[in-house]
Amino acid sequence: MPGQSAEPSKSAAPSTVSTLSATRSPALDGIRAIAVLLVVALHAGFLVHPVGAGLPRSYVPGGFAGVDVFFVLSGFLITTLLLQERTKRGAISYRWFYIRRGLRLLPALAALLVVHLLYAIQQGRPLLPELKALTSIAFYASNFTQSFHYYMPRELVHTWTLAVEEQFYLVWPVALTLILAWRARHGRSSRWPVPSALVVALIVTNVVRIIEWKTQGYPAAYELPYCHADGLVIGAMLAFAHHNGRPPRRGAEVAGWAGLVFLLAFAVFWVTGSDANAIYYGGPTVLALASAAVINAVLLGSGRLTRLLSWRPMIGIGRVSYGLYLWHVMVLEILVEHTLGLSPWPRLLVALAITAAATLASWWLIEQPALRLKDRFEPITLSP
């Protein structure tokens, strides 16, 4: 998940500096909130319509679009941070980059894995398969584990997205350094390698996803990093556009509203079943482009859209979105298995209350202390 945002830039001009500062805009937290709420709404359907019905009965069947929103945000924010560090310091510190990412992501994830292990022991599950699954998650390989059909506890299946992002973090800083070095060697006027490389990556992702879908099917075609890099690549392209002072300005606000409406409509009206296969034919790219349109509009200061996404409850949810994403599946799945003598809707209310408590505990007791420690390793200051 993307890092937390702080105070927005006070500069209204959409210059490179103000755009980079705007990566701390509260409206981006609002976008995070929409993303995580879509995913939570999707998974809540498993509780309301338990095992045997599942996704086709979810009231928000297209809520998985929230994952693509997160990927675009991650691609944009990470690329922006790396570009700004390269501009200000002349180089990218891989050491500090990975330390900061580790402090942001690992503590909360470790807590989730410990709690799951205790739950598995209490339930009398065989420990060896559980430990293997937890090891794959800890090393950010659960997308490969699930793609190769190894055992993964239902409470932890959503960790594949964390693996995809971490694999992006491993590859992209080095690839970005090589691209920028090539451009520097051939002169600043030679900018084509950057957009060309990203466009090629986007095309390859779509081609490989179709091939994987026809040969391996789900989940490989959806969860492997080279099959679901659309959002990360498009987020990186958006970061380059803003860094170079050439963001898409014409019709940005209209495009932002259209992107938001499209994402929400997709989440509610997406039809599962035989037609769902269409998602493998460019679906994540379309969702990522809609997400990028919303982010771009916010970065350029779209008034009404920015105000909507800067609504305080949305900001609050966005700031704790990482913990909310981590914990909600476990809570929902446990309450699918243990009815507590309640019908589905009251159980959903209980699940949401427990999820909220776990999310806040993660934020205050684990993530906040880790973020304070992370700030000590921040090589640059994004605030204006």
Image: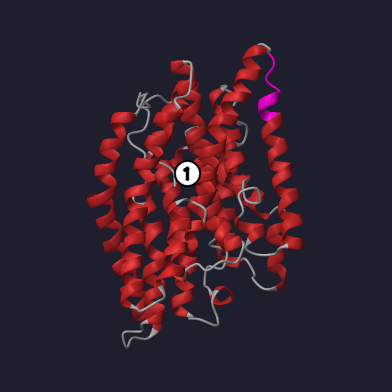
Establish if 202 lies above or below 38: above
Q: Is residue 316 visible?
A: no
| Side of 361 where 181 appears, left or right | right
| Side of 263 where 84 appears, left or right | left
Relative to the observer, which residue lies in front, 204 or 250?
Answer: 204
- Element type at mark 1: helix
Dot 1: few (<14), some (14–19), or many (≥20) neighbours within 10 Å?
Answer: some
Establish if 220 lies above or below 305: below
Q: Is residue 381 visible?
A: yes
For disc 1, the marked residue is: 305
User: Residue 187: horizontal and vertical position, in percent?
Assistant: 66, 11
| Side of 63 where 1 appears, left or right | left
Q: Amino acid at mark 1?
A: Leu
Whether 263 is among the magenta residues is no
User: Residue 118: horizontal and vertical position, in percent?
Assistant: 31, 69
Q: Residue at x 59, y 75 (%)?
A: 56
Establish if 24 lies above or below 89: below
From which residue to which does the magenta span run?
189-195
Relative to the observer, which residue lies in front, 122 or 157?
Answer: 122
Q: Residue at x 55, y 41 (%)?
A: 168
User: Residue 206: horizontal and vertical position, in percent?
Assistant: 72, 49
Q: Residue furthest front?
A: 128
Q: Identify the colour scheme used.
A: secondary structure
Relative to the observer, which residue lies in front, 356 or 216?
Answer: 216
Whether 191 is among the magenta residues is yes
Q: Residue at x 72, y 62 (%)?
A: 278
